Amino acid sequence: MTRTDSILNQGINAGNGLATAPDAGARFLQNCDTLTSGLTSPPLAAPELEPYPPAPPARHKPRVLVVDDMVDLAELLVELMHLFGFDTEVACDGETALRLLSAGSFDAAIVDIDLPDTTGFDVVATASASGWLRRTRIVFSTGNRSGQYERTAARFAGSRLLWKPFAAQDLLTCLEGLEPFAAAEGHSGTADPFSPDLR
């Protein structure tokens, strides 16, 4: 063995604690494999992901029927309802109002008392008798400040009466609890609250 081989073997032995032998180099590589084999990391398990939270329920968007033969006022009411997040349908006479009420439910109806073909009272009475107002709040409106109108409107349990011209805040007060951010409270869908008492 040359002096160089002796120095290399001593260095290997000092650094790794391996026995000196002519095949020390081979044994050095073999022992490295043995040492590193125990350091092999196991396969990483896939992380458990948290499930996505369920989507929040869609907000109830109240539907309002505007019944008024004054086109300008009806359009103004539609704009106001849309501004506050309501869906709106419009009828300019009693016949159209009854057709819309029969076709779908409304959370509220703003009904002018003096219509060209009938009265708002008759519209509400007919729709109520047909079972179309089980979930509908009624707001009567009129420019005729008649005591008779006020007394008749009072016979429709749960209805409101607005004198024209009325402020937007007065109308919103009548619709209180039906805002889109309210969860449609009070809609039991059982007894009809707007059956008139005409005794």
Image (tube, rainbow, N blue to C red):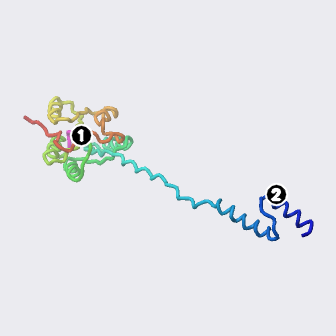
Q: Quadrant of the C terminus?
A: top left
Determine if the magenta segment contains residue 194: no
Say left or right for 174 vs 128.
right
- Counting from the top left corner in percent of width and height, residue 19 is at 78, 63
Q: Quadrant of residue 67?
A: top left
Give residue 1's position: percent from left, percent from top: 90, 70
Q: Which residue shows up at 72% across the image and 67% down it? A: 30
Secondary structure under the numbered disc 2 in the rendered image:
helix
- Nearer to us of marks 2 and 1 is 2
Give me the C-alpha separation between circle 2 and circle 1.
96 Å
Disc 1 marks which residue?
137
Marks 2 and 1, the one that precedes in the sequence: 2
| Residue 69 visible to the viewer | no
Q: Of all residues shown, which one is farthest toward the right?
A: 3
**Label 2 environment density (alpha carbons within 10 Å; few <14, some 14–19, many ≥20):** few
Check the image and report above or below for 83 versus 45: above
Q: Amino acid at mark 1?
A: Arg
* Residue 136 x/y as whole percent: 23, 43
Identify which residue is drawn at 69% across, 61% down: 35
State the extent of the magenta-drawn residues as a range. Answer: 111-115
Marking on residue 14: 2
* Front one among 134 and 152: 134
Residue at 45% over, 52% down:
52
Front residue of this view, candidates 87 and 32: 32
Q: Secondary structure at mark 1?
A: strand
Report whether 64 appears left or right of 150.
right
